[in-house]
Amino acid sequence: MVDQGAGRPLPVKATAGPESATIRRLVIAVLIGLAIAGFATAYLTTGFQGGIEGGDSWVYLAAGERLNAGHALYALTPTDRPVLIVPPYWTVPLLAPPPIAVVWRPLAALGPASMDLWSVLNLVSTAATVLYLAARGGLVGFGIVALFGEALGLLALSGNVNGFVLAALVMAWRSRDRPVLVGPFVAFAVAMKLTPVLLLFWLLGSRRIPAVVATAVSLAAIAVISIAGAGLDAHLDWLRTVPGSQPSPQSISATLHLPAAVVSVAGALVVAAIAWRGSERWAFASAVIVSCLITPAFYFQALGLMAAAAAPWTTPGASARSTTAPLGDPTMELPA
């Protein structure tokens, strides 16, 4: 085609031919196969962990029972449900902050059946989140699900709260324009696992100040509920236990022989730099990935949380907001 006025050829819009569509379908089929293989490997390795003695849901149930009985949360008495303690990696019957035990107070009233209920809900939550990322995330979503297939399988089968945290992280991205929703989702992830606090850099860098405020308010509300449900002493006991537990052998801190605080600060600086100068979707993705990597309680299944980094690619029509726009002008955007 030629521009009749200038005599210059007009640009021709490229269209995907049947060959590229076939290649795309083949790639997706391979990625689906890899993801299924990862899930199958996880199942053959551990099976379904709901109700298994010593599993994560067992530990949560024991914590809820101790609170209901008026016992110390971070210590065991002879009448408490037994919990395995493995010094120096964990020296107390619960590594997590008190909020998870408060969540389990009403569940503990159901007895051992609560472990099956929790684990099934965790499995459904994880599976639904994974299917959403794969269905809406295009090749990026399929690729990430395939890459972390085995870790996601372990996450789904373990009964660990990480399954719900994964869903909360993805929902935080989906509700990023609604502070009243994104705040509670981010606050929940922080209350359960602490290191997702790095998501605040994403919110600050993208000038979502109302969302930051909503997160702070939600965290304050969780703290009030947690103190009411577990007592102030339990929270002080948890703070005292943190220095006594060594990072897991698989953690970056243990691998590099660095203090956990140094690793955390370095990770925060990386996320802050990306959030300040990069696009919003990369700020979110980096916050998710780094929050998983820097945790001292790092085990293989925690890699499954990184799948939430695919969430920004589930909304391909959304532009990547400039992280250098003035604080009062959140409308300045960069191409996605």
Image: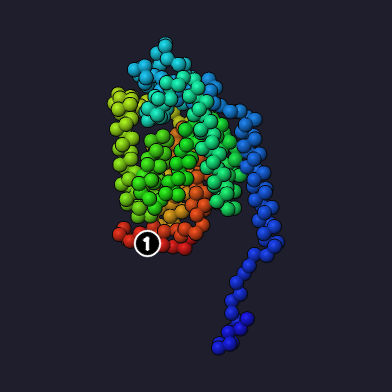
Tag count: 1
Q: Can you name the residue that lies furthest to the bottom here?
A: 5
Q: Can you say whether 134 is above or below 261 in the image?
A: below
Q: Is residue 42 above or below residue 276?
A: above
Q: Toward which corner of the image does residue 63 lie, by quadrant?
A: top left
Q: Residue at x 42, y 49 (%)?
A: 175
Q: Residue at x 50, y 27 (%)?
A: 117
Label 1: which residue? 331
Residue positioned 58% across, 87% down in the render: 4
Which residue occupies 35% across, 27% down? 238
The spot of residue 297 in percent (x, y) is 46, 32
Between 87 and 73, the one lying in front of the other is 73
At which x and y percent is residue 53?
53, 20
Q: Is residue 207 visible?
A: yes
Image spot of residue 141 (x, y percent):
56, 49
Say which element carries label 1: loop
